[in-house]
């Protein structure tokens, strides 16, 4: 699950105890550090010295951002039950450490940073980019700007303020099954000899030796994915940099299945970095709006059930090519292009499609907001047809603001969420620590909304709405055409008048 897999990766010891009601039923919440850990990298401690292009990425979250991630996590936390006495909303309370790789220009860094991906969707309007820094192989911290993330690959792209690395050595082709590789990722290291009472988190870039088990080709002939087997793999290896014995980067680990890691190849990483750098923003994945199955995976009766005649269905099944569409999302690019369930997409941009992975890869290479050409066979028409479809873009629906909001809010309703306000309930004991009584802690206000214009800010605690205490209410509570919010900000009481957005009933 999202919060468990993200938050259990890298945390230093500290005193913040955070218990959330909806999380408690499934798994105890993690214990992040009270203050930002100063990360010390022991570059000499690893079993094998990493290639110079492998760097350490440090991502820090303050209390407000961590609450927001809890709200958007699969557990959908709704309330905060208790906090450490030293907790401060604006302090850094969680430190995530990951590996990254310097690209060919020596100043662009690509890394797997799932928490930063969530933050980055709003920071262009929120003026609050993810707090990330880069530590080079020599242990020195480098200044870096978070540019955005690429939704197709899930990679975050950073930019150093100057070129600090030699051109990276990468390998895209002639990768052989059986070739030895090393997966580099941060791991805990023993503390150095320092004075007691420090707040350091010691890590090193450790390595796991593996072997290329499979090379999955793309329709174009290049490498689409690699699979690497290794004896000792864990969640910490996700995001690790895969390097061959010659010191060349071959990719970044983006998934695990037992003792096998899937690796995003170097060519895909370069394309992801290029997309984000060109846009200077996060780039959504291309979206068509269909579900389908490869013809090679279907039985004859399944093809017949979609309206195909026996002779043509047998011909399709015998050739083992194409993707049969089983459903179309209304108002999607596919629907607007008149694609229908039962249609079989045989080619994308003149490249034959045999597997579902071929189809996905071809769309990913096209990119969002671009046209693709399909060769389509239809059950009610004897000849193949050519269709040109313009793809749209989609960010991850699990963390996209509008999808998050629409999970809770009915159309044409008015509520805190509808007004662009994300809030989490504070239990009385927690509220007292923050200088207020029980209420709703505001963790985000969408820019451009009436709430934003009225001056509501993250960190405010809403005690009542139109005179009614909110301790028993949730963020989807309905609002009047003009509502009055009693708010506590830094232990001072304020009154904020909130106008209902036009167009709502």
Image (cartoon, rainbow, N blue to C red):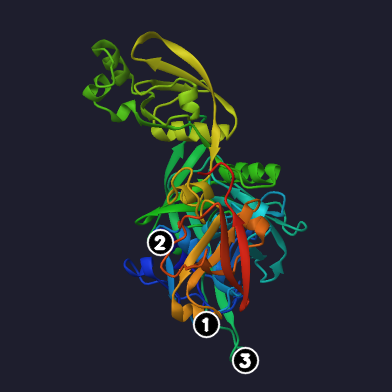
Q: CA distance from mark 3 to mark 2?
A: 34 Å
Judge depth for marks 1 and 3 and give the one in front: 1
Determine whether, in the image, residue 179 is placed left or right of residue 281: left
Label 1 sits on a secondary structure element that is helix
Closer to us: 481 or 428: 481
Q: Residue at x 38, y 20 (%)?
A: 343
Q: Residue furthest left?
A: 301
Q: Comparing marks 3 and 2, which lies closer to the viewer?
A: 3
Q: CA distance from mark 1 to mark 2?
A: 42 Å
Q: Which of the labelled discs sits on residue 233, or is there none?
A: 2
| Upstream in sequence: badge 3 or badge 2 | 3
| Residue 168 horizontal side relative to residue 334, left or right | right
Q: CA distance from mark 1 to mark 3?
A: 32 Å
**SS category of the residue bearing label 3:** loop
Q: Is residue 370 visible?
A: yes
**At 66% from the left edge and 59% from the top edge, which residue is drawn?**
454
Pointer 1 with pointer 3, Cβ within 8 A: no
Secondary structure of residue under mark 2 = loop
Q: Nearer the viewer, mark 1 or mark 2?
A: 1
Crowd rating for badge 1 (residues with CA inside 10 Å; few <14, some 14–19, many 20+): some
Against 470, residue 244 (above or below) is above
List x then y, in percent, for residue 196: 59, 92
Q: Which mark is residue 433?
A: 1
Q: Between disc 1 and disc 3, whose residue precedes?
A: 3
Query: Which dot marks residue 469?
Result: none
Q: Residue at x 55, y 84 (%)?
A: 86
| Residue that extends furthest to the top in the rendered view of this protein | 382
Outermost residue toward the right in this view: 162
Instruction: Locate the N terminus by quadrant.
Output: bottom left
Decide: marks 1, 2 in contact (CB < 8 A)? Answer: no
Find disc 3 in the rendering and name its residue: 195
């Amino acid at each position: 699950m999202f919060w468990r897999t993200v938050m259990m990766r890298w945390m230093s010891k500290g005193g913040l105890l955070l218990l959330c009601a909806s999380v408690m039923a499934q798994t105890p919440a993690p214990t992040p550090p009270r203050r930002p850990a100063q990360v010390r990298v022991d570059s000499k401690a690893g079993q094998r010295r990493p290639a110079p292009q492998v760097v350490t990425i440090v991502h820090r979250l303050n209390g407000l951002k961590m609450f927001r991630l809890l709200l958007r996590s699969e557990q959908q936390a709704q309330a905060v039950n208790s906090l450490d006495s030293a907790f401060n909303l604006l302090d850094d309370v969680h430190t995530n450490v990951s590996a990254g790789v310097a690209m060919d220009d020596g100043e662009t860094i690509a890394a797997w940073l799932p928490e930063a991906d969530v933050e980055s969707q709003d920071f262009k309007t929120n003026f609050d980019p993810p707090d990330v820094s880069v530590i080079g192989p020599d242990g020195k911290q480098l200044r870096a700007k978070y540019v955005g993330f690429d939704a197709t690959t899930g990679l975050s792209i950073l930019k150093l303020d100057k070129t600090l690395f030699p051109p990276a050595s990468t390998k895209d082709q002639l990768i052989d099954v059986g070739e030895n590789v090393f997966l580099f990722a941060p791991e805990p290291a023993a503390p150095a000899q320092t004075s007691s009472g420090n707040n350091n988190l010691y890590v090193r870039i450790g390595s796991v030796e593996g072997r290329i088990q499979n090379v999955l080709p793309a329709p174009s002939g290049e490498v689409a994915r690699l699979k690497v087997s290794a004896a000792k793999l864990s969640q910490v290896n996700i995001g690790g940099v895969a390097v061959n014995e010659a010191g060349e980067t071959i990719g970044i680990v983006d998934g695990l299945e037992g003792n096998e890691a899937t690796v995003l190849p170097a060519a895909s990483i370069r394309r992801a970095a290029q997309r984000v750098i060109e846009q200077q923003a996060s780039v959504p994945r291309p979206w068509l709006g269909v579900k389908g199955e490869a013809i090679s995976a279907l039985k004859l009766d399944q093809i017949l059930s979609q309206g195909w005649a026996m002779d043509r269905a047998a011909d399709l099944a015998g050739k083992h090519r194409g993707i049969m569409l089983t459903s179309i999302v209304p108002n999607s690019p596919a629907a607007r292009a008149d694609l229908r369930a039962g249609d079989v997409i045989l080619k994308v941009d003149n490249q034959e499609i045999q597997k579902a992975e071929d189809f996905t890869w071809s769309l990913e290479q096209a990119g969002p907001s671009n046209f693709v050409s399909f060769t389509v066979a239809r059950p009610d028409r004897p000849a193949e047809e050519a269709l040109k479809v313009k793809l749209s873009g989609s960010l991850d629906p699990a963390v996209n603001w509008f999808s998050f909001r629409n999970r809770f809010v009915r159309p044409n309703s008015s509520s805190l969420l509808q007004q662009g306000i994300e809030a989490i309930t504070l239990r009385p004991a927690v509220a007292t620590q923050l200088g207020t009584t029980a209420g709703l802690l505001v963790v985000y206000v969408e820019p451009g909304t009436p709430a934003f214009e009225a001056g509501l800010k993250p960190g405010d605690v809403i005690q009542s709405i139109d005179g009614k205490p909110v301790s028993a209410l949730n963020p989807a509570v309905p609002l009047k055409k003009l509502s009055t919010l009693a708010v506590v900000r830094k232990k001072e009481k304020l009154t904020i008048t909130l106008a209902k957005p036009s167009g709502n009933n």
